[in-house]
Image: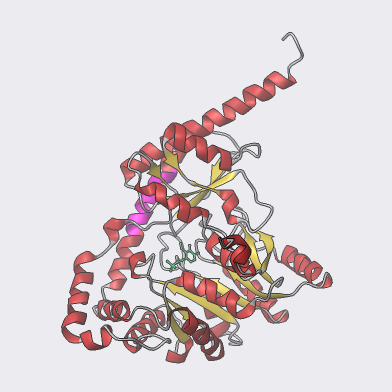
Amino acid sequence: MINLDAMLSDNAKNMKKSAIRELLKLTSRPDIISFAGGLPAPETFPVADLKEAADIVFDKHSAKALQYGTTEGDVDLKAEIIKFEARQGVTLKDENLLIVSGSQQALDMVPKLFINPGEYVIAGRPSYLGALNAIQAYQGKVLGIPFTPEMDGFDMDVLARSYSRLVQGGGKAKYIYVIPDFQNPAGLCWSLEKRKALLKFAYDHDLFILEDSPYREIRFLGEHVSSIYQLDQHGENRGIVINLKTFSKILAPGTRTGWIMASEAIINKLVVAKQAMDLCSGVFTQKWLAEYMKSGKIYEQIKQTCENYRVKRNFMVEMLEKHMPKRYDVKWTKPEGGLFLWISLPKYISTDELLLKAIEQEKVAFVAGSGFYFDEPEHNAMRINFSYSSTELIEDGVKRLARIITKEIETYEAGHRAKTLPEGM
Ligand SMILES: Cc1ncc(COP(=O)(O)O)c(C=O)c1O
């Protein structure tokens, strides 16, 4: 019998199962209220409009839609994306654009292109674990920079010091990975000032920036801030920013379609990387999305989705305020967009352990914060999603969550008191 483990490549040995994908399986259990996945609200999917667009493809473009397409992506869809981005102030040419099968594919392509074993990516602590797992799969390493709820971007002094230590120790970094708009997991946003400072840092040290923006359009409060891609474009235009976008959160993740914006030279390299992966993204889907976008309905769709999430986010915050223990060390973020908020708990609580109790005792699920660290994880936080559940389930789920957290704190503190009280008391 062949020993599978012994046969695996070094890259395969480095592949990690995504804790979130595993947890998503729980959402199908009807007795569990899951705040774990990053699922958009199904009631926002514009089914009738999408059906209409699919009918047009079958009626008018079936020969092309059912055929292989170019790796770069469907010209009609690219033309629509160029118009879409122009409305947000981004100037794009066809050669700056590559259609991918979801931005997750791009998160795998970029380290594939840049990272040799042992080389570094600079990323926030915490960061999106799908990006971290992809880096690890190419035997890359991550230089983690703290990015906590009270921050509006990296502390640039800390970044400079960590980077200089890395370089002095012989380490080589290739790019900085950031999610400046409503980051996954904590929903945090970078200020304009910090975006500019990061771009300058990248210029000064010859680093690329991988700007992952799946939630950029899902802003339901506050003011729009320029993307780092835009800042480069409207400034020195050095073409060092690779910006990822996706239809997953603005339309439907089942489309499995996203796009990469970058300099022509980088796009050409990424095209070669993609050729070996899937030849091209699904052509029917691209034509279908192009037809849908031609209708112009995407803008109203995004507006309605933002409104839906604004209501749910406000409701979840209200429920947390009402039901969670009122203590300085139990707090949560109040994001202005995106799909998630991040709850920090007292240092002595491990949400990895709490998760098992929450599922068993209260039938409520979240993602333990430790999954969002490449190494040396913090254990006392959790990510919860507000977009997927109805307000009824949000209320019930937050009550369950509050009960299990309260119980955990009380149990710890009773044990701690018993230990510190003098004997006989
Ligand atoms: C920060 C971030 N990047 C990328 C992705 C993957 O998105 P897609 O569905 O386009 O593959 C996600 C999904 O949740 C995400 O949160």
Specify whether 279 is left or right of 1: left
Q: Quadrant of residue 57?
A: bottom left
Q: Which residues are magenta?
A: 307-317
Q: Quadrant of the N terminus?
A: bottom right
- Residue found at the far right of this picture: 168
Q: Position of residue 206 (x, y in %)?
A: 70, 82
The image shows residue 411, relative to residue 79, as above or below, that is: above
Q: Quadrant of residue 209?
A: bottom right
Q: Quadrant of residue 11?
A: bottom right
Residue under the point 67% across and 56% down? 375
Q: Quadrant of the C terminus?
A: top right
Q: Position of residue 420 (x, y in %)?
A: 74, 21
The image shows residue 272, relative to residue 303, as above or below, that is: below
- Residue found at the far left of this picture: 59
Specify whether 180 is left or right of 401: right
Tally of marks: 0
The image shows residue 188, relative to residue 172, as above or below, that is: above
Residue under the point 37% across and 43% down? 394
Residue under the point 74% across and 75% down? 172
Residue 193 visible in the picture: no
Residue 210 visible in the picture: yes
Residue 308, magenta (yes or no): yes
Q: Position of residue 305 (x, y in %)?
A: 33, 61
Q: Position of residue 33 (x, y in %)?
A: 38, 42
Residue 408, magenta (yes or no): no
- Residue found at the far top of this picture: 424
Q: Main secondary structure of the magenta part?
A: helix
Give 199 or 356, whichever is nearer the viewer: 356
Give 29 or 155, whichever is nearer the viewer: 29
- Residue found at the far front of this picture: 1
Residue under the point 47% across and 52% down? 22
The image shows residue 75, relative to residue 284, as above or below, that is: below
